[in-house]
């Protein structure tokens, strides 16, 4: 056993040094990334991959479970070949590769560390208890990130509901804990962290969205309570069985909180390149080897969920490059000029594209709409209402046809932030934790809705009306 661990550490150290050195050598390539006009036909691999994720499990689940890696890699290869040999834009692929490594490093390390924390909750999972757990998860997601909160809470949530678990339990967990809950801080969701790196002050977002966050979370929890109460009343007999088997509360593996804090702290490391990801890897490795085997057994921990996410999102990251590049070059042609349009535009695309680059593209478009540069801190402060707009006009005259920065221009940033975070709940692929929660639930033999079932049964009748209310009261 010690020999195997020693080999793992040697291999891990070698890979860390190799990737650190490779990206350090190529760092200048990352800084020279340029966007070029793309053939819109090369957006089709992305559409085909989304269609495959949505349709193939419904048509032939066994075939899909066996062949989804081949589908994801084949469609991704088409785009990679196009960018390398047709557009000769290798730096763009390198940037996406680095973004993918960062994404999977955060998701994967949190998955491993959370798998070493065993929480057993006393109770019968009544509707009010479930609402309390989901509401707590919404708050925690702003401190641990939606991924961290999801990975820590999903297993105890499934266990406490095991006598009456239904697909809607998993879906509403994704809605609240994996997405909407994390809208208050840059730690909460990746798009907000990118905004923080661009110059949005850490506490600015909570001062501008807390009332909208509270209303949205409250409405989603209300919808959940109505559905859960109805089903709870139908299953009184089953709940009497549960009452006879109430388990004592238990918490194990609390030493992993140290590794969790290491990962969250690493998020703020910018230089040198790859140091952030390497810290996450080693925190995950240390967590895995210092966690007792019986804790992993109690959590039914295995690497199948993270493997599925890693493979599918490798294909998604590759195939979405042409879609994102086209969006960045043609955002102004879409006629999106009001905060309401930015809310819906950012939101709809964040439902299918990765919400972090979608957030940045619409943020850049909103700044360009006002003749400002998103990478200029003075312009950022002016757009957020934190500096004099007169200073901006003197330092950077408005572009022809640009809107002046007057009035409540901060509403554009508010709308883009909420659209990116809230709408990530609309589909399984809208945010990284969504697919992982689904996979963990299925590993626990919980039935989950199909891609279309998720959208048709829950997104459209529950989330869309709530988002319409948010739009009507705050962005019209």
Image (cartoon, rainbow, N blue to C red):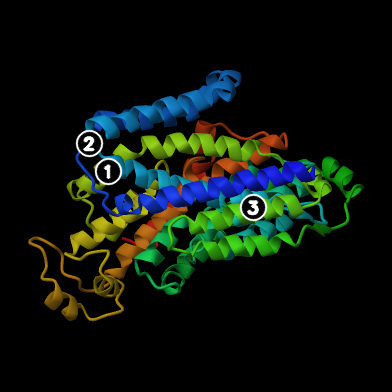
Measured along the vertical axis of the image, is residue 58 above or below residue 253? above
Q: Quadrant of the C terminus?
A: bottom left
Q: Is residue 424 left or right of residue 164?
A: left
Residues tagged 2 and 3 counted as in contact (Cβ below 8 A): no
Q: Is residue 394 left or right of residue 346?
A: left
Binning the other alpha carbons within 10 Å of mark 3 as few (below 14), some (14 to 19) or many (20 upward) gives many
Q: Which residue is mark 2?
A: 38
Residue 155 placement (x, y as % from top left): 72, 48
Measured along the vertical axis of the image, is residue 58 above or below residue 165? above
Q: Which residue is mark 3?
A: 284
Binning the other alpha carbons within 10 Å of mark 2 as few (below 14), some (14 to 19) or many (20 upward) gives some
Residue 355 placement (x, y as % from top left): 41, 49
- Earlier along the polypeptide chain: callout 2 or callout 3? 2
Q: Who's the residue at 41% across and 50% down the image?
A: 23
Is residue 220 visible in this depiction of the protein? no
Q: Who's the residue at 55% across and 44% down the image?
A: 434
Report the number of numbered marks. 3
Residue 149 placement (x, y as % from top left): 62, 57
Q: Nearer the viewer, residue 256 or 204?
A: 256
Q: Is residue 382 left or right of residue 191?
A: left
Q: Is residue 127 left or right of residue 29?
A: right
Q: Secondary structure at mark 2?
A: loop
Residues tagged 2 and 1 counted as in contact (Cβ below 8 A): yes
Q: Which residue is mark 1?
A: 325
| Mark-to-mark CA distance, 2 and 1 | 7 Å
| Mark-to-mark CA distance, 1 and 3 | 33 Å
């Amino acid at each position: 056993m010690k020999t195997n661990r020693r080999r793992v550490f040697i291999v891990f150290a070698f890979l860390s040094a190799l990737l650190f050195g490779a990206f350090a050598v190529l760092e200048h390539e990352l800084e020279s990334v340029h966007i070029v006009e793309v053939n819109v036909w090369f957006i089709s691999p992305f559409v085909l991959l989304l269609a495959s994720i949505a349709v193939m499990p419904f048509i032939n689940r066994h075939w899909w479970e066996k062949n989804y890696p081949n589908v994801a890699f084949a469609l991704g290869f088409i785009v990679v070949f196009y960018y390398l040999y047709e557009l000769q834009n290798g730096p763009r692929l390198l940037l996406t590769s680095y973004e993918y490594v960062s994404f999977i490093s955060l998701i994967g390390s949190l998955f491993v560390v959370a798998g070493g924390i065993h929480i057993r909750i006393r109770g019968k999972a009544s509707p009010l208890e479930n609402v309390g757990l989901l509401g707590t998860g919404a708050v925690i997601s702003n401190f641990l990130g939606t991924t961290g909160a999801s990975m820590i809470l999903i297993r105890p949530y499934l266990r406490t509901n095991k006598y009456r678990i239904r697909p809607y339990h998993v879906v509403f967990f994704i809605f609240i804990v994996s997405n909407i809950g994390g809208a208050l801080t840059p730690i909460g969701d990746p798009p907000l962290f990118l905004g923080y790196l661009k110059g949005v002050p850490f506490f600015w977002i909570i001062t501008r969205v807390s009332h909208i966050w509270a209303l949205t979370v409250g409405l989603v929890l209300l919808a959940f309570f109505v559905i859960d109460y109805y089903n709870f009343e139908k299953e009184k007999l089953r709940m009497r069985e549960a009452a006879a088997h109430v388990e004592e509360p238990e918490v194990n593996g609390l030493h992993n909180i140290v590794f969790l804090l290491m990962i969250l702290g690493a998020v703020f490391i910018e230089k040198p390149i790859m140091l952030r990801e390497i810290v996450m890897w080693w925190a995950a490795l240390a967590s895995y080897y210092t966690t007792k085997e019986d804790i992993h057994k109690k959590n039914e921990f295995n690497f199948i969920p993270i493997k599925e996410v890693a493979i599918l999102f490798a294909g998604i990251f590759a195939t979405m490059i042409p879609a994102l590049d086209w969006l960045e070059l043609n955002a102004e042609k879409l006629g999106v000029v009001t905060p309401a349009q930015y809310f819906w535009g950012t939101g709809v695309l964040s439902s299918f594209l990765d919400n972090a680059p979608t957030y940045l593209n619409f943020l850049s478009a909103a700044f360009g709409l006002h003749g400002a540069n998103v990478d200029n801190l003075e312009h950022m402060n002016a757009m957020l209402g934190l500096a004099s707009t007169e200073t901006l006009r003197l330092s950077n005259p408005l572009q022809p046809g640009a809107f002046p920065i007057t009035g409540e221009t901060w509403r554009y940033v508010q709308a883009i932030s909420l659209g990116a975070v809230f709408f990530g709940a609309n589909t399984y692929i809208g945010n990284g934790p969504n697919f992982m929660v689904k996979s963990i639930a299925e590993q626990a033999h919980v039935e989950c809705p199909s891609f279309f079932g998720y959208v048709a049964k829950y997104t459209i009748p529950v989330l869309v009306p709530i988002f319409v209310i948010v739009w009507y009261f705050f962005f019209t």
